[in-house]
Structures are given as C-alpha cells and as structure tokens.
C-alpha cells in the first residue's frame, strides 16, 4: 500500500483533510471536506508552493523534403515550427537575435543531432563541396523568424545544397529549433526533428576513350580516389576534409568500395561477367571478393512505384564467384513497367566491396578480370575489349584516359596499401632538471634564485605522437590559461617540428626557459595544459580520414616558485 500524507486544519469547527501523494508530483490537491448533516460546503483548493504553472513557450519542429538526392544537387525543404506552450515564442522580426529563436538545418551521418549552433564547412577553411558530420547546410540557418503565439505554428521553406563530396549513403537532414537556447521554454528536450535521405553519386562524367580502343572496361577508383591517384606503393595523397591537413603517402582502411566503368554495349555475346580479386604482395594466391553487389530498378504497378534490388552477384559459375555487368534491361514483372533509374541517386556506384579490417596490414594487389557467359576468361584483344585507365579530369568534367597494361593472365591489377592500426599519444610529465610533475595537483616548482637561462632551470617538455608505420600527423599545443604559449605540428616521423626536435619515431622534446612559458603577463606562476592530437592518415578513399584511429592526450601542470 502506498503511503499518504494527511494534513488537518480547522475552519469554524470543520475538519479539512488534504491528501497528496508523497512523491510530490501533484501540482495541487483537492481538499476533502466533512461537515455536519445538512450543511453543504464548497470544496477548497490548496495551492502548494513551487507547483504553480509557469507561462512559457514550448518550441517544436518538423521537417520534410525529398527522400533521395545526388551529390552536388540543390534540394528544397519545408520546416514547420510549432509553439506547444502557453506563451509567445519570440522571433527575430520583433526581438533581438540574442533573445529569439532561429532554426539550423543540419546534415548528419546519424540521428544523434547536437542542440548547438552548427557550422558550415566553409567557415573551417573547407569548401561548399566538402561534407562534415553534423554540418550546417549551405544557406540553411533560418535567422529571420516570426513570433509564434501559444498553440500556433509558422512554416518556412528554403533551398539548400548537398555537398559534391558527400559519400553515397543514407543520411539525416535535421531541423534544430532554438539551437542557441535563447528562448526559455517549458521543455528543452524536444527541439530536434529529422528525416532520412539517400544521397547517391552524381551522374558519371563523359569518358574520353583513347584512339584505337573500341569496347572498353575501366578500373576506376577506390571510393572516390581514382587509381591514377594511387601510387605504385599503394599509398595516396589527399586533403582531409575534416582537419584540412594535406595527407601525404596515406594508406587505405575500413570497408573499401571498388568502382569500374565499362562500355555501354556491355554485356554482349562475348562478355557477361567480371571478378575482383586480391592478394598480399609476396604471396601467390588470389582471393575472390565475395560481398553481394546490387543495383536498384524502378517498378511501376498502376499508381504504385517501388525500387527493388537486382543482385549482380556473386554468382557461382565455373568454380568462381563472378558478378554480372548490369543487364541492358531490368527484370520484367507481369502487370508492371520496369526501368533503370536515369541516375545513380541510390548510390549504386560500386562493383565490389572489400572489408580491409579483416586483412593483415600491408601492401596488396587488386585485380579486375572479365569473363564470358559460361565463365571462360576473356583477355584483352582487338576483337574482344581493351582495358583503359583514368589519367585525369578535364575542365568540363570529362575523364581522360590511357590504354591500361594487362597482367600476364589477362586481368588488370593495381596496388593498395592497407593499414587499420590506431595512433598513439602521450605527453610526458614536464620536468625541471630531475624534478618532474609527479603529484596529482600538477605543480612543477622552480627555484627563483636560479636564472631562467640556466640549463638546469629549463622546463623539459616531451611527448610521443606515434603510429606503427609512421602513417600519421600530429598537432601539439601548450595553453596558458586561454593563451597559446607554444604550438607545433607535422609528420610523426619528422626530425624537427617548430622548436621541438624529433627522433624520427614520434618522440619530440624541447627545453623552455620558464619565462618563455610564463610570458610577461605571468612573471612568476601560471597554469598550463599540454594538448596532443595525433591524426591517422588512413582513408576509405573519400578524402577524409578514418578518425576513429586518431589518438589524443592532455597533461595539465602549473609552474610556481618554491
């Protein structure tokens, strides 16, 4: 039985008993009255302090738009802002921006949307073509907002842009109302709405085929890194869209999507299938790709439209795992009309998948081969087909190509270096001579009578920015209060970085005069944080790092006289 609280008061000899639940969730209680026979009383309401209803707005939002788009496309969105509260929600048309609501439109890889001001990549040194998770979409902050009366709504529409370098996949487009928390609301945990959108690759650009080549097959890219940008070492150079850093000799990692193009006349009577295989350099056995690959088609039955998947493979033919070149016509269905989509807005751009996380780190060869209807290998020849490879992109987007050199067995191979190993980061305790920061309070005490220029009085800063194969970069910063006292960055394998000397394996150190760290405004003592971040270079081919392999470390300390 639940416990109850009984409160008694006496009014003109009449006992009033107020009963309320002990949990304190009742905002008001109805007094229960007892009176002598024949006496009729009106019930009294007891107002309990702290439980009176406060008048405030309650902003909520809804968003809708297209369910599919392609890289670089402009899309239209509809945003409805509701006020479910009992007071006016102020907009910027009548109230200062610091006290009014605005709405941010965010592009995210998942449904976890932070309630904070979002940032457009161009403000971080990137471009309108770059994608960053939880980014503010281009021109998508609704800052000219209207007042919304209690229990009313207002509607906004806008056009925004899908970044051209957004990797194909399923994303969330979210609306965040009052991202800056300028408006005091009765509820603060219901300010986000989102819907899911599939972003596919833009239409393939035209391909300029070399003279003398008729039917062609082109090994094209790993992700969006074309094979002409992959070195013989299997490494690549790219500018990271997350940090803006130039990554030189970067390996590949995570799940890799392989792409190839081919003549529009394929498949034909001679060529029906292809196969991707791989092997570690120095070994002799080729392993087949085995992950399923499919393409969507449109199926219209009356007024109903659906998008089934046609599986290209793997098909077990002649003892091998082969994949189809996409048929000229999609599967037929009685009573329905079927067509291939006009563009790859489903993201059906890959012809094979390789999860490199299941492989040992190192250099691999990737090979593409072509087969006939019965599973017999078809080798390049004037009467069959020729391999071509990309060499660059012209100003109008046309892919330029050259004739590709086949392997002795009639395939085409290129190298990919795989490395899924994580970085390491550690900041040593700062030291003066043999004294280091050892206690949990973090004080490093110095003798003020010893000149700061004396070598024994200098503060030794040492840190380790590491990667097993040195495929990483780092940034190191010492902050005094809110002021940067020292900064350095570069390759973990560098011999020098700013004032720091390195051993080539990621260990950097330097001895500072205490006056260099303290500065003129803090002549005797100061509090510091030493912040180390190590950036893995590995990429899945889409011009951004596998930042889950990054590492960071922070060391706090204080300089003070003995």
Image (cartoon, rainbow, N blue to C red):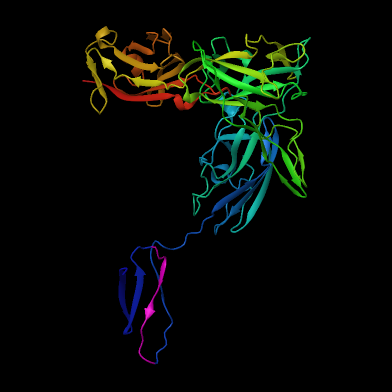
Q: Could you say where residue 37 lies in the image, as x and y percent from the top left?
A: 37, 91
Residue at x 38% of width, y 78% of height: 32
Could you tell whether 521 is left or right of 367 in the image? Answer: left
Please state which of residues 307 and 94 is positioned toward the viewer in this rendering: 307
Please state which of residues 175 and 334 is positioned toward the viewer in this rendering: 334
Dominant secondary structure (helix, strand or loop) of the stretch shown in magenta: loop
Q: Would you identify the image quadrant in which residue 528 lies?
A: top left
Please state which of residues 77 and 223 is positioned toward the viewer in this rendering: 223
Could you tell whether 87 is left or right of 301 in the image? Answer: left
Residue at x 29% of width, y 18% of height: 430
Note whether 23 is above or below 400 in the view shown. below
In which quadrant will I find the C terminus?
top left
Q: Residue furthest bottom?
A: 38
Count of numbered labels shown in the rendering: 0
Whether the magenta-drawn stretch holds residue 27 is answered as yes
Q: Could you say where residue 541 lies in the image, as x and y percent from the top left?
A: 57, 22
One can see residue 444 in this view: yes
In which quadrant will I find the N terminus?
bottom left
Whether the magenta-drawn stretch holds residue 516 is answered as no
Q: Could you say where residue 392 lies in the image, as x and y percent from the top left?
A: 68, 14
Q: Could you say where residue 501 lies in the image, as x and y percent from the top left?
A: 38, 8
Could you tell whether 513 is left or right of 203 in the image? Answer: left
Could you tell whether 490 is left or right of 373 in the image? Answer: left
Q: Would you identify the image quadrant in which residue 522 lies?
A: top left
Where are the magenta residues, as a range? Answer: 25-37
One can see residue 90 in this view: no
Please state which of residues 301 and 43 is positioned toward the viewer in this rendering: 301
Note whether 58 is above or below 65 in the view shown. below
């Amino acid at each position: 039985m639940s416990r109850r609280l009984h409160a008694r008061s006496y009014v003109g000899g009449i006992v009033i008993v107020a009963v309320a639940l002990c949990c304190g969730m009742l905002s008001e209680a109805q007094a229960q009255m007892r009176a002598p026979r024949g006496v009729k009383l009106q019930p009294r309401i007891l107002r309990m302090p702290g439980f009176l209803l406060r008048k405030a707005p309650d902003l909520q939002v809804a968003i809708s738009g297209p369910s599919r788009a392609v890289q670089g496309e402009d899309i239209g969105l509809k945003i409805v802002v509701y006020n479910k509260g009992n007071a006016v929600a102020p907009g910027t048309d009548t109230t200062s921006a610091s006290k009014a609501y605005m709405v941010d439109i965010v592009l995210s890889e998942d449904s976890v949307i932070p309630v904070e001001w979002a940032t457009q990549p161009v403000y971080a040194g990137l471009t309108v073509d770059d994608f960053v998770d939880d980014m503010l979409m281009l021109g998508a902050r609704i800052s000219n907002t209207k007042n919304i009366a209690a229990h009313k709504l207002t509607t906004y529409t806008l056009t925004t842009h899908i970044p051209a370098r957004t990797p194909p996949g399923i994303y969330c487009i979210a609306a965040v109302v009052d991202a800056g928390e300028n408006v005091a609301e009765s509820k603060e945990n219901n300010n986000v709405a989102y819907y899911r959108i599939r972003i596919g690759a833009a239409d393939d650009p035209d391909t300029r085929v070399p003279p003398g080549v008729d039917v062609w097959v082109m090994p094209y890219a790993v992700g969006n890194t074309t094979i002409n940008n992959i070195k013989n070492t299997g490494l690549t150079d790219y500018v990271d869209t997350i940090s803006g850093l130039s990554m030189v000799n970067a390996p590949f990692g995570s799940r890799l999507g392989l792409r190839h193009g081919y003549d529009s006349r394929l498949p034909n009577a001679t060529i029906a299938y292809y196969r991707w295989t791989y092997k570690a350099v120095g070994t002799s056995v080729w392993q087949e790709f085995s992950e399923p690959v499919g393409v969507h088609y449109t199926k219209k039955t009356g007024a109903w439209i659906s998008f089934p998947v046609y599986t290209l493979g793997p098909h077990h033919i002649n003892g091998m795992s082969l994949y189809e070149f996409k048929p000229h016509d999609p599967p037929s269905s009685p009573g329905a009309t079927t067509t291939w989509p006009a563009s790859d807005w489903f993201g059906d751009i890959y012809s094979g998948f390789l999860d490199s996380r299941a492989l040992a780190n190192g250099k691999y060869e990737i090979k593409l081969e072509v087969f006939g209807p019965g599973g017999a290998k078809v080798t390049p020849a004037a009467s069959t087909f020729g391999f071509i490879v990309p060499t660059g992109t012209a100003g109008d987007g046309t892919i330029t190509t050259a004739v590709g050199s086949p392997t002795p067995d009639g395939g085409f191979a290129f190298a990919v270096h795989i490395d899924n190993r994580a970085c390491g980061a550690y900041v040593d305790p700062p030291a003066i001579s043999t004294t280091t920061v050892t206690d949990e309070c973090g004080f490093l005490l110095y003798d003020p009578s010893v000149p700061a220029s004396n070598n024994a009085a200098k503060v030794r800063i040492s840190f380790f920015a590491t990667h097993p194969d040195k495929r990483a970069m780092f940034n190191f910063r010492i902050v005094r209060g809110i002021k940067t006292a020292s900064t350095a960055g570069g390759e973990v394998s560098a011999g020098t970085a700013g004032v720091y000397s390195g051993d080539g394996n990621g260990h950097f150190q330097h001895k500072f005069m205490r006056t260099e760290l303290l500065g003129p405004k803090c002549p005797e003592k100061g509090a510091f944080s030493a912040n180390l971040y190590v950036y893995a270079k590995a990429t899945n081919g889409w011009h951004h790092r596998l930042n889950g392999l990054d590492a960071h470390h922070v060391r706090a300390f204080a300089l003070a006289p003995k």
